[in-house]
Image (cartoon, helix red, strand yellow):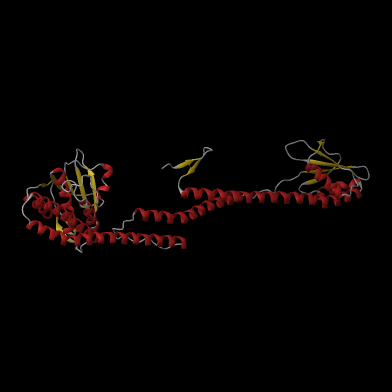
Amino acid sequence: MKAAIRLRSGLTWPSTLRSRIFLILLIGLALAYGLSFSVLYMERYISAKAVMLGTLESDVATSIAVLDRLPPGERGDLLERLSRGNYRFVLGPGLPGVPDTSSKGAEISGKIEEAIGHRFPIRIERIPGDVNRLQAHLTLSDGSPLTIDVTPKGVMPIAAWLPYVFVVQMVLLILCTWFAVRQAIRPLGELAAAADALDPNKDGPAMSEAGPSEVAHAARAFNAMRERIAHYLEERVQILAAISHDLQTPITRMRLRADMAEDSQEKDKLVHDLGEIQRLVQDGIAYARSAHGNGEKSARIDLASFIDSIAYDYQDTGKAVTVIGLVQGAAFTKPHALRRILSNFIDNALKFAGAAEISVERSAENDIVISVMDRGPGIPDDMLEAAMQPFFRLEQSRNRETGGTGLGLAIAQQLTAKIGGSLRLYNRAGGGLAAEVTIR
């Protein structure tokens, strides 16, 4: 699966739901936070502008009236006291400038003229330079020039600690977004893990039903589905067991009648067919018993004696079954179930290869690994997993002598689950198949 999906614009879109939700929430919250910051900045700018124009309108009128009534010699003493942070008074024509036609200049000129009641004509000029600076020129009643030097201020200065607060807020935003996404996605991950581990044939723990109501409802639905599947499988196996058991009686009667019949070629064919049916019925009963367990208790066995006894039983009937390597140690398991598992492996090896080898090893985790190996045709790699399904046969001729019933490996898998082990099939290097059961 690709890590991301490429969009038409060339950008990449994350492929995981976790990343997508995290990205959407983070971008949305960041945009909302940026919009709030922009609104706050604009509000501060408007407030600063309103304060400046309000000061011009209220204070400048009073200041000009005071300066106009004072004798020219006393006006210089009040200039500093009448000045403010964004403007000051200068006696004289001021600095040379250029006419200002901007909206800000017109707004300032209008405020000053409105404040002094249009008694003194005002001319606004912009002073060239790096700083935004305006000068309002007017003439007092006695003909003395007066200049109002205005330095319009923008937004109020930002505090030095405000950027650090912004960084902390962004970190909290990311952490909260990540936590929210984790809380939303974690139940999906748990549900996916439970679905992957779903095996109605094994008694595993139910999915936890704790958490929010929606999560608890999904968990309850999943557990109920798991129980229904297990119930359906149990019913299927019970039907198979019942049919197989009920077939034994008529098969036995038919076998007795066939044995009492006169010897003929038709009799031999009938006895042969009845034998195949009986083997199929016995395998069906064995599969049903392996699915439900036979109540066998675990016991400690000596591996060397146990493996040798299985090999000797086959050797006594002339079968080529050998034990390779040194077998030692003990295992705590269900002996009859393990014997049936290994017997199924050996029967398959003898059927397809004519010989079987048994080896016992200990894994790195100190588990006991028992392998039955042969040099037969093996199984195609893409069919190894399907070979352990009930009634699956690689040989499609429907001949019981070559294809079997398709239950041997399924029975072995069922019994392996009952003893708490694991089963694995793999093709050997150089040809042949290895059937491996691990006892933990």
The percent position of residue 85, horizontal first and vertical second, equals 76, 48
At horizontal 8% and vertical 49% (from top left) the residue drawn is: 265
At horizontal 44% and vertical 60% (from top left) the residue drawn is: 215
Q: Is 249 left, or right, of 318 in this rendering?
A: right
Residue 379 vertical position relative to residue 188 in the rendered view, above or below: above
The answer to whether residue 440 shows anywhere in this view is no
The percent position of residue 156, horizontal first and vertical second, equals 69, 49
Q: How many marks?
A: 0
The percent position of residue 160, horizontal first and vertical second, equals 62, 49
Q: Is 4 left, or right, of 148 in this rendering?
A: left
Q: Is 66 left, or right, of 252 in this rendering?
A: right
Is the N terminus in the top left, top right, bottom left or bottom right quadrant? top left
Is the C terminus in the top left, top right, bottom left or bottom right quadrant? bottom left
Q: Nearer the viewer, residue 408 or 72?
A: 408
At horizontal 79% and vertical 41% (from top left) the residue drawn is: 134
Q: Nearer the viewer, residue 49 or 35?
A: 35
The answer to whether residue 290 shows anywhere in this view is yes
The percent position of residue 228, horizontal first and vertical second, equals 34, 61
Q: Nearer the viewer, residue 25 or 390?
A: 390
